[in-house]
Structure formats: C-alpha cells, structure tokens
Image (spheres, grey):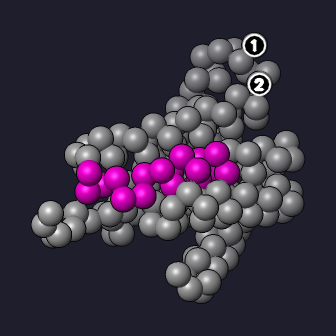
Amino acid sequence: MKWTEISFPFIFVWIIQILFVDLLSIGTVRPDFPLILILYLSVKHGRFTGVLSGFIFGLLIDLSGSAMFFGLSSLTYTTSGYIFGNLKGVYNKVSPILFTTSWVLVVFFHFFIFCLVQYQELWVINNSLFWSKWFGTSIYTLSFLILFQFLFPLNKKSNVKS
C-alpha cells in the first residue's frame, strides 16, 4: 500500500467536508463524507488502517472547529474504522446481502453514538426529534454511500476457485 493511495483521497474528502458540506446540509442534518472514506479504506486495507484513518479524520474534524464536543469525532470514526476493518475479506465468505447489512448497521451505530452525545438534550426533552435527527443523518449519509456503491463497489466477488 502506497501512502499516496490513502493521502490524496484523505485530503480531498477533508476539503470537501470542510468547504461543501454546509451547502448540502438540510437543517442540522449533514452528510458525513469522512465516514464513507473510512468505510472504503477499512474494508480494503483492514482494521489498522481503519482505526488510524478514523482517528486522524476525527482529530482533523475536531480541530477544524466544526465539532461541538472535542474528541467525539475521533471516538466515533475510530470505532467505526475498527468495526469496518473486520469486514476485510468477508465479502467472499458470506452472502452480499449479509455483507451490505453489516456495514449499513455499523453506519447506523456510528450515527447513534454521535447523535447520543451531540443531541443529548433532545434525548430528554423531545425523544421523537432525537430519533428523527439520528435517522435523517444516517439515511442522508447512506444515500451518498449507495451512490458511491454504483460507481465504486466496496468489493467484487473474486473468481478464485477453492
């Protein structure tokens, strides 16, 4: 693995997240492009790359001033990178539906932890608004992820016979 293979998409996605995510936001619901890149890097290169890229992305997002709680992005991206990294090489061993369901559930889990801290007052005051923020953020990012799946599939079934 070359360092340019990770660094150029990393810088590109970080710039897109900082500059253009406000244009795509619907109220307080915004897409999370670093999570999409962490998913791709983790499934392709494994847990270590997922954890490292998740931590660095989270730190950059926290330091760029777009996060209200310092360390929350690092925590959620690192955790998601680790779990996504467990999916490396699994595509050929399980059904595509199980593989897809796995990473979709991790995306929902990522946003649940994020929204639980970010919108903790809504959890107490207006529970249904909390669930709508969580679901909206998850679905918005998943819609971009599904679009990327058509252009750049996460994994292709190999033709290797055993």
Name which residue lies at 60% across and 16% down.
128
Q: Residue at x 56, y 35 (%)?
A: 109
Question: Whole-Å distance between the Cαs marked 2 and 1?
Answer: 7 Å
Residue type pointed to by label 2: Gln
State which region is magenta.
Answer: 77-93
Q: Quadrant of the C terminus?
A: bottom left
Q: Please rate how many residues cluster around mark 1, counting C-alpha atoms within 10 Å: few if below 14, some from 14 to 19, many from 20.
A: few
Q: For residue 154: magenta? A: no
Q: Amino acid at mark 1?
A: Val
Q: Position of residue 85 (x, y in %)?
A: 51, 55
Q: Contact, CB < 8 Å: mark 2 with mark 1?
A: yes
Q: Which residue is mark 2?
A: 120
Residue bearing mark 1: 124
Q: Measured along the vertical axis of the image, is residue 41 above or below residue 79?
A: below
SS for tag 2? helix
Residue 50, horizontal then vertical, whole percent:
59, 59
Q: Is residue 14 visible?
A: yes
User: Is 104 placed left or right of 98 in the picture?
Assistant: right
Please determine whether, in this image, residue 2 is positioned above or below residue 158.
below
- The one of 161 and 22 positioned closer to us in this rendering: 161
Residue 26 position by quadrant: top right
Residue at 86% across, 47% down? 70
Question: Position of 123 compared to 12: left or right?
Answer: right
- Left or right of residue 153: residue 109: right
Along the viewing direction, whichever of 142 and 89 lies nearer the viewer = 89
Work out whether 106 lies above or below 57: above
